Amino acid sequence: MADEALVVLQGVNKWFGDLHVLRDIDLTIDRGEVVVVIGPSGSGKSTLCRVINRLEPIQKGTITIDGVALPEEGKELARLRADVGMVFQSFNLFAHKTVLQNVTLGPIKVRKTSKAQAADQAMTLLERVGIADKAKRYPAELSGGQQQRVAIARALAMDPKVMLFDEPTSALDPEMIKEVLDVMLDLAQDAGMTMVVVTHEMGFARSAARRVVFMDQGAIVEIASPEQFFSNPESERAQDFLSKILAH
Amino acid sequence: MAACRVSPVPPLQWFGATYVELFRNAPLSVLMLLFVFGLTKAGVGPYSFFASAIVVLSIYTSAFLAETFRAGINTVAAGQAEAARAIGLTFPQTLGIVVFPQALRTVVGPIGNLFIALIKNSSIASVISVLELSKRSNLLIDQQGVSPIPVFLGAAVAYLILTLPSGFLVGYVERKVSIKR
C-alpha cells in the first residue's frame, strides 16, 4: 500500500457558538492507514471525526478527501460522503428497514446498483460481519453488537475510500465490544481499509493503529506510534490521561 | 410545507412558517369570505362557491397538516438523518426515504383527527352559501317548518356516517404501519 495522502486536514478550526472545539488541526491520513484518536471527553475527538464528512461544518481551514476539497452542502457533498463510510456510537440503523434493506439502501439509491446485485453484495458483507442469518430482521430485534456490525456492513456496502468510526463500542455492553472490535480489526489488517477510529479501546489502538492521535481541549497534543505513545508519551497531558485510564 | 419548515434553506423556512401561521390562525369563515369576495373584487374568478369552499378547506387543513408532519419529523431521532446523509443520500432523499416514513407512523393518529375536523369544518362553507349538511338542515327548519331537534339529530347522524369510518380507517392504518418495529 502506497503512502499516499487520502484525507488531509489543514488549519481546521471549529466553534460551537463561543466554544472553540477544534483548534488549528493539521492531520494527514494516508491510504490504508489506521489512525486512532483518543482523548478525554470534550476534547473534540468526536467532532474531528464528524467534520471529515462534513456532518459538522468547519469555520476555518480546509479538508480534502482524495484531493477533492469538501464542497458546500448539496449534491456534490452527498456524492463525496458516499465515499466516506461512517459508523456511529448509537448505530443509527434505519429503524423502519430490515437489516438487508439497511445495507442495500445506499447502493440502490446512491450508486444505482440493481436490487439483485445490491442484495448479493449485502449478503456477502453480512456474512463477513457474521450476521447473515438476521438479514430479514428489523434493527430493534438485534442486540447492540449485532446492530453495530450491520452498521459497519452498511458503510462498507458503499465501497468507501475511508471509514470513520465515532466511538463505535461506547454504547455496547462489555461482552459485545469484542465482536465489533474483531470485525474492525479484520477490516484494518486483512482488508487494508483506511480508518479513523475515535475510541476508548486502548487494546484496539495498540493492535490496529499505525498512529495514535491524542487530543485535548480541541487541539492535537501528540501524534505517535502506539508503542511509543503507550510506553513513553511525550506530553504531560497524555501521561496524565494514560495514568488515569490505565490505573486499573 | 413541512419539508419547507425543516429544510436548511432559510427562505423556504420563512415561506413555510408564513404559510402555516397565516392560514391556521385565520378563522375559516373569514378565509372563505375573503377568498370568494376578495378574488372576485381583484378580477379573478368568480369561481363556484363549491369549488371555492374546497380550495379554502384544503389550504386551511394543509397548514395544520404541515405542523403535524413537522412534529412527526422532529420525533425521528437526529441520528437517522445523519446516517442517511453519511451514506450519500441527498436532502430530499433523506427526508423521503428515511425521515418521512418514520414520521408518518407517529402522526397517523393526529392526521386522522385533522381529516375528521376537515369533514366537520365543511359546515363553515354555509357562510358562502354552499348547501352543505348544516345549511340544508337550517333550510329545512326555516322554510319547511320542520321541528329543529329531529333535523339536527339527523344531521349529527349524517356527520357520524362520514366521520366514523374515517376514524376506523385511521385505526386500521395505524395498526398496519406500526407492525414493522
Image (cartoon, coloured by chain):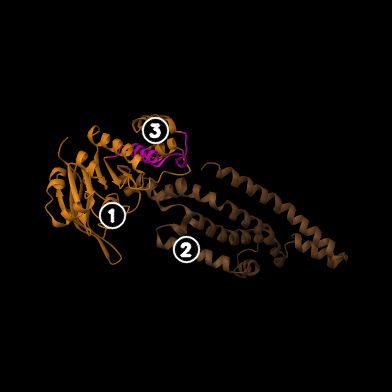
- Residue type, label 1: Thr
Q: Which numbered disc, 1 or 3, marks the residue that appears first in the sequence?
A: 1
Q: CA distance from mark 1 to mark 3?
A: 30 Å
The residue tagged 3 is: A131
In this picture, residue A162 sits left or right of residue A154: left
Main SS, magenta region, reads helix
Which tag is nearer the camera, tag 3 or tag 2?
3
- Residue type, label 3: Ile
Specify the chain shown as brown. Answer: B
What crowding class fits label 2: few (fewer than 14 Cα within 10 Å), some (14-19), or many (20 or more)?
Answer: few
Q: Looking at the image, which residue sits at the far front?
A: A248
CB under 8 Å between callouts 3 and 2? no
B11 lies above or below A85? below
What crowding class fits label 3: few (fewer than 14 Cα within 10 Å), some (14-19), or many (20 or more)?
Answer: some
The residue tagged 1 is: A47
The residue tagged 2 is: B15
Q: Chain of mark 2?
A: B
Which tag is nearer the camera, tag 1 or tag 3?
3
- Point out the stretch of residues depicted in magenta: A136-160
Tell me the quarter of the picture where residue A217 sits.
Answer: bottom left
Q: Chain of mark 1?
A: A
Specify the chain shown as orange. Answer: A
Q: Between residues A241 and B55, which one lies in front from this camera angle?
A: A241
Residue A66 percent coordinates (x, y): 22, 44
Q: Which mark is residue A179?
A: none
